[in-house]
Image (cartoon, grey):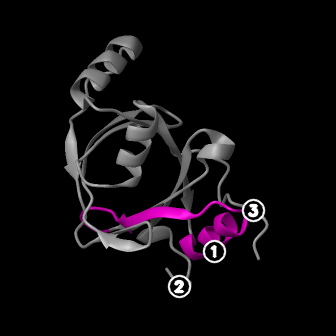
Amino acid sequence: MDDRLLDEDAIMQICFVTDDIAASVAWFSGLTGKPLPDIGTAGTDGEAIYRGRPAAVGCRLAFFHFGNIDVEFIEPGPEPSAWRDLLEARGPGCHHIAFKTRNLTRRNAYLEERGHPLIQRGEFDGGGGRYAYYDTVAALGAQIELLEFDKDREPQDGM
């Protein structure tokens, strides 16, 4: 059993879920003075796993890049997803804090052993890595996302 979550001493991103991404990024751009980012779409090149079952999930998303962290905005599609769950339960607000990992299998076990089950996982659009969201809302007020990039991945079993 591993005794830590982090592979690096850094937070990669903080994400806000919204029901109107265009309005949210316009407001944040005006607040921070950062240029408006492109709004993209993401789904899955295959299928994601949502609450233990294969699922097609999609969203619109935009990123603001800062020197030490990215701020992400996600507008979920209409289908059930980790994004839609939190938006419907609490309205727009903080969805997750993301950490980079080199071993998603080991970090998955670490979180689940501590009572934070996996909600959703999938591959990044276009390949290159994978993401996983964990239910840490009761303890943190937001989910934790782990991001594993193929270029940094350690050998592992499982996921």
Q: CA distance from mark 2 to mark 1?
A: 9 Å
What amino acid does circle 2 point to? Gly
Residue, far front? 89
The kind of secondary structure element at disc 2 is loop
For the residue pair 91 and 131, the one nearer the viewer reads as 91
Residue 158 tag number: 2
Q: Mark 1 Cα within 10 Å, few/some/many (few <14, many 20+)?
A: some
Q: Are marks 2 and 1 in contact (CB under 8 Å)?
A: no
For the residue pair 79 and 157, the one nearer the viewer reads as 79
Which stretch is magenta? Answer: 103-127
Q: CA distance from mark 2 to mark 3?
A: 19 Å
Residue 80, quarter of picture: bottom left
Residue, far bottom? 157
User: Percent from the top left, x then y, of residue 43?
Assistant: 23, 58
Seen in the picture, residue 48 relative to 70 is either above or below; the reply is below
Lateral position of residue 129 relative to residue 76, left or right: right
For the residue pair 98 and 49, the one nearer the viewer reads as 49
The kind of secondary structure element at disc 3 is loop
Lateral position of residue 34 relative to residue 38, left or right: right
Name the residue located 38 percent from the left edge and 39 percent from the top edge: 88
Residue 128, quarter of picture: bottom left
Q: Earlier in the sequence, mark 2 or mark 1?
A: 1
The residue pinned by badge 1 equals: 106
